Image: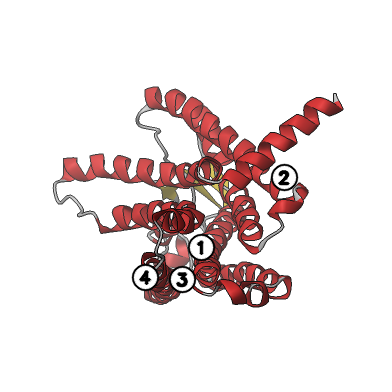
Amino acid sequence: MEVANQSIVVEFVLLGLSDQPRLEKTFFVLILLMYLVILLGNGVLILVTVSDSHLHTPMYFFLGNLSFLDICYTTSSIPLVLDGFLTPRKTISFSGCAVQVFLSFAMGATECVLLGMMAFDRYVAICNPLRYPVVMSKAAYVPMAASSWVAGGANSLVQISLAVQLPFCGDNIINHFTCEILAVLKLACADISINVISMGVANVIFLGVSVLFIFVSYICILTTILRIPSAEGRRKAFSTCSAHLTVVVIFYGTILFMYAKPKSKDPLGADKQDVSDKLISLFYGVLIPMLNPIIYSLRNKDVKAAVRNLVFQKRFAF
């Protein structure tokens, strides 16, 4: 009866940095600039991988998918965050929150699978170069990329289906910039153990298995590279996978840092840590998508050449 008498939640209030208004304007400018870099950098990568015939290979096809994913992931949340920095009352509808959680889960899981497939591509290219055209043919790598999106979407559909069935009939204040799933589940007035178990299983599958697969792939790659007699040959072989390895280390390293650091037991320290956790999560959501095109552009001669050709063609056209 007590639950029945409570009003049903139809919208959530996002706290963000409401208690620190001075920081909001600073972070608005900073996050906006980073978001524009994400759109520009990943947009250019997609454009060159589609328009330049030299980049019509499995590695760059996966890279184009990764860039598109980064744009989708940030666009699902950053505009709302930017609006929240300028709006006194930061609200989002229940359905809008559900859509945001779905997209966040889908993009995160898809990226894990994509990074694993990119590691497999590098493994075949270095460890079995003669079989590479057969193993990584277009008939193989296109379904591989498509399956990563399907797997991410299916996982997200399961998680959001379980979440929307929960009754939200009490507090509607989310202590975050966006509808972060754990912050949302804390507001449910029912047992969330099924949700926690489901997310734990998904993390094992999409994070644990992906990390293990990438680790084994790079052990085989490193072993093969060390067998190459010439130093120049080893350097060239390693350069073909250094950008992907850098992205993997940043992606999973940041996740490990976010969830493995100890929690403060002091109330004052806990409040400061809440702000710290929110900011780390926010910058995680924009920093990695911003760094991906930079890393692949700086460390890849083919991409740099394709960008130069694209710029030259635009100038010549005008």
- Residue at screen point 63% across, 77% down: 135
Tell me if label 3 and label 1 are in contact, CB under 8 Å.
no
Image coordinates of residue 38 in percent, x first then y, are: 57, 39
Instruction: Decide which of tag 3 and tag 1 comes sooner along the chain.
Output: 1
Provide the secondary structure element on which disc 2 rests: helix
Q: CA distance from mark 1 to mark 4?
A: 20 Å
What amino acid type is highlighted by mark number 2? Leu
Tell me if label 1 and label 4 are in contact, CB under 8 Å.
no
Q: Residues within 10 Å of mark 3 (few under 14, many from 20)?
A: many
Tell me if label 2 and label 1 are in contact, CB under 8 Å.
no
The numbered disc on residue 206 is 3
**Is 159 in front, or is 225?**
225
The numbered disc on residue 115 is 1
Instruction: Decide which of tag 2 and tag 3 comes sooner along the chain.
Output: 2
Instruction: Decide which of tag 2 and tag 4 comes sooner along the chain.
Output: 2
Q: CA distance from mark 2 to mark 4?
A: 35 Å
